[in-house]
Image: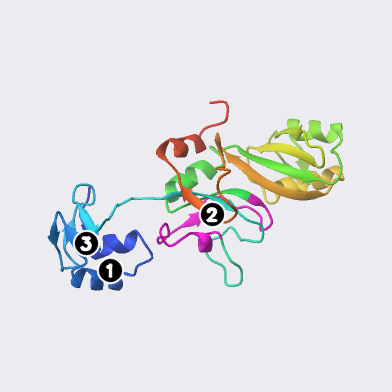
Amino acid sequence: MKKERLDKLLSSQSMMSRSDAAKRIQRGGVTVNGVVVTDPSRKIDPGSDAVLLDGEPFLYKKYIYLMMNKPAGIVSASRDPKEKTVVDLVPDSLRRPGLFPAGRLDKDTTGFVLITDDGHFAHDILSPRRHIDKTYLAETDTPIKDEFIMQMRTGMTLGDEQLLPADIEQVESKEKIIYKIVLREGKYHQIKRMIACTGATLLSLRRIRMGSLPIDEHLSPGECRELTPDELTKIACRPDE
């Protein structure tokens, strides 16, 4: 692994500025392989050198991948001058420069958002060539007629847009009308526009799965956690793979 300056390495893994990292190093708060290092320009190998920051192990990760349970009213963006974003909800212990949501959910849509700083991975799963399946639960005010169900399953036309076939089935519920919908593309407000064409009104929308990875139902709205390598692999897979 390429060697990096110690101050640059520390700042890359948190929201600590490079100058703040240098000050902590100069104050003797960092050890490398058991030896206190006070030179911020010292180059180390994050793959083999053991680094302690204030006595705690410093674990280097080239990229980070977070699953968030997005609440309603939050914008899927890295930053916004007026609105709170999903990145704003990431706790300090997981926050680092360059985080962004890989794909967007509408402001009032809830559920699974992938947040990362790995642009190559995000591009791979979002590109039209490899666009992963995304599964949603949509609540409507009235049942969707069979003719529109068939249109969705075979490929609905929205204006001049020809959509890819989407899986849709009604979910058993005593009090609500809920459909599970699987999309294989990411058109603007796609589900909202599809349902509007049927004459029904979309009451709520929640993303529950990306690829073959379901959302962790233990995450409260606004909470997030790191994905395991196995979970990350599942995002890039179809549910039947």
Q: Position of residue 188 (x, y in %)?
A: 68, 51
Circle 2: element type: loop
Amino acid on which the number 2 mark rests in the picture: Glu
Say above or below: 1 vs 71. Answer: above
Q: Earlier along the polypeptide chain: callout 2 or callout 1?
A: 1
Query: Where on the picture, by quarter, is residue 223?
Result: bottom right
Q: Residues within 10 Å of mark 1 (few under 14, many from 20)?
A: many
Q: CA distance from mark 2 to mark 1?
A: 27 Å
Q: Return the mark for residue 194.
A: none
Residue occupying the point 46% across, 60% down: 91
Q: Return the mark for residue 223.
A: 2
Say above or below: 66 vs 237. Answer: below
**Is 192 displayed left or right of 217 in the figure?**
right
Q: Return the mark for residue 21.
A: 1
Would you say the magenta stretch is mainly helix, strand or loop?
Answer: loop
Circle 1: element type: helix
Residue 90 is a magenta residue: yes
Q: Mark 3 against mark 1, which lies toward the viewer? A: 1
Circle 3: element type: strand
Q: Position of residue 164 (x, y in %)?
A: 68, 36
Q: Are marks 2 and 1 in contact (CB under 8 Å)?
A: no
The magenta span reads 86-110
Q: CA distance from mark 3 to mark 2?
A: 33 Å
Q: CA distance from mark 3 to mark 1?
A: 11 Å
